[in-house]
Image (cartoon, rainbow, N blue to C red):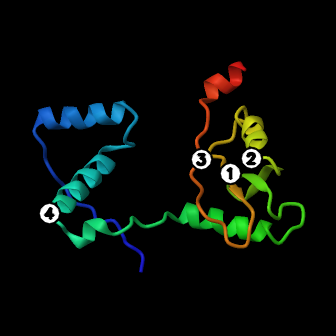
Amino acid sequence: MVNSLQTFASKLPKALADEVDRLIASGRYANRSEVLRVAVRALLESRGSPAARADPPIPPRVHAFYRRLRELAKDARYRHRWVALHGDDVLDADDDHDALIRRILDRPEEPIDVGLATEKPAPRRIRLSSPVSVRRA
């Protein structure tokens, strides 16, 4: 079952709206809707709502990314290698994750997704250096 987003209108006092806009300007949130979703989820979690504990739905773009990694795993050129994708297009591939990241930092395409081409790709949490410090090196 896919969760669909419901639209609803709300009004906030100017002072609260200004604070929401400051959060967006800080880069922490993409837009007002995201700020409100996070705030409502936090309120519901504080009250023990099971709906608030549910994992957010995985966006279609992420499903497509993992599907593409599974497809690439069937090709010997990419199997068990790190690949950089822009949409369905392979931009680059390497056995060394860090080397691949260094090469794609200067590419103009956005977004660039990087993943390991395997039959069962999974999210991997990694720590990256700042692009600014990498480019200066």
Task: Identify the residue position indicated by label 4 in the image.
Answer: 47
Question: Is there CB contact under 8 Å for labels 3 and 2?
Answer: yes
Which of the 4 image quadrants contains residue 66? bottom right
Q: Which quadrant holds the N terminus?
A: bottom left
Closer-to-camera residue (37/13): 37
Task: Identify the residue position indicated by label 2 in the image.
Answer: 97
Question: Is there CB contact under 8 Å for labels 2 and 1?
Answer: yes
Q: Position of residue 100 (x, y in %)?
A: 77, 43
Q: Amino acid at mark 4?
A: Arg
Question: Is there CB contact under 8 Å for labels 1 and 3?
Answer: no
Q: Position of residue 122 (x, y in %)?
A: 61, 64
Q: Residue at x 34, y 36 (%)?
A: 24
Task: Identify the residue position indicated by label 1 in the image.
Answer: 114
Report how far apart the C-alphas of labels 4 and 1 lie in the structure. 38 Å
Q: Residue furthest right?
A: 76
Report how far apart the C-alphas of labels 1 and 3 lie in the structure. 11 Å
Q: Amino acid at mark 3?
A: Ile
N-terminal of the two: label 3 or label 2? 2
